[in-house]
Amino acid sequence: MIILACDHAGYELKEQIKEFFNKENITTIDVGCYSTDSCDYPDFAKAGNEKVLEGANNVGIYICGTGIGMSIAANRNPKIRAALCTNVNFAMLARKHNDANVLVLPGRYINRTRAIRLIKVFLTTNFEGGRHLRRIKKLKGA
């Protein structure tokens, strides 16, 4: 399942992404926010994290103005590996090398087209394992 979360600065891009998924008949869970009214990104990162962790195959797409706040908030949970990505190489490597389960996007700095491209790469790239798995396991003890 794909979990969508945003703050007010990410709301418009989240709605565009949701529209894309709807056209592709891909079900998402939207944990908010639901308008451009000012709100606090940690609340929505936490709500997203709870849903992501409900299923082994769940992934999150979180959006705030720069992506930095959502990244920091999401990564407070040791079972979340949130990656702020602004290009396709970052999105691919976040999955391939870091087994990221949350893609974070900077809503004020990328457009719908780029966001969709990053999402497609993120969702279709598999974790490589091997030496990368060893590194992921070390994060659990950090």
Image (cartoon, grey):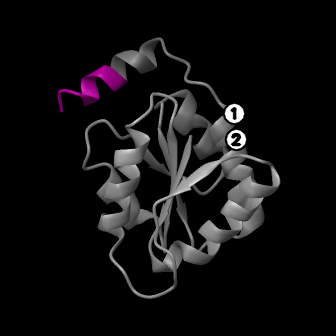
Q: Which mark is residue 40?
A: none
Residue 76 location (% of width, % of height): 25, 50
Is 34 in the magenta? no
Residue type, label 1? Thr
Residue in the foreground of this view, choosing between 19 and 115: 19
Return the residue at label 1: 124
Residue 64 position (above or below residue 21): below
Could you say which disc has been placed on residue 121 in the image?
2
Query: Which residue lies at the image location 35% right of the left edge and 40% below the top edge?
Result: 80
Start-end of magenta stretch: 136-142
The kind of residue on which mark 2 rests is Val
> Which residue appears at 43% of the width and 42% of the height?
52
| Dot 2 crowding, Cα within 10 Å, few <14, some 14–19, many 20+ | some
Is residue 110 at all visible to an observer of this figure? no
Closer to us: 84 or 38: 38
Tell me which residue sits at (46%, 48%) in the image.
83
> In the image as oriented, which residue stretches furthest toward the left?
141
Q: How many marks?
A: 2
Which quadrant of the figure has residue 136?
top left
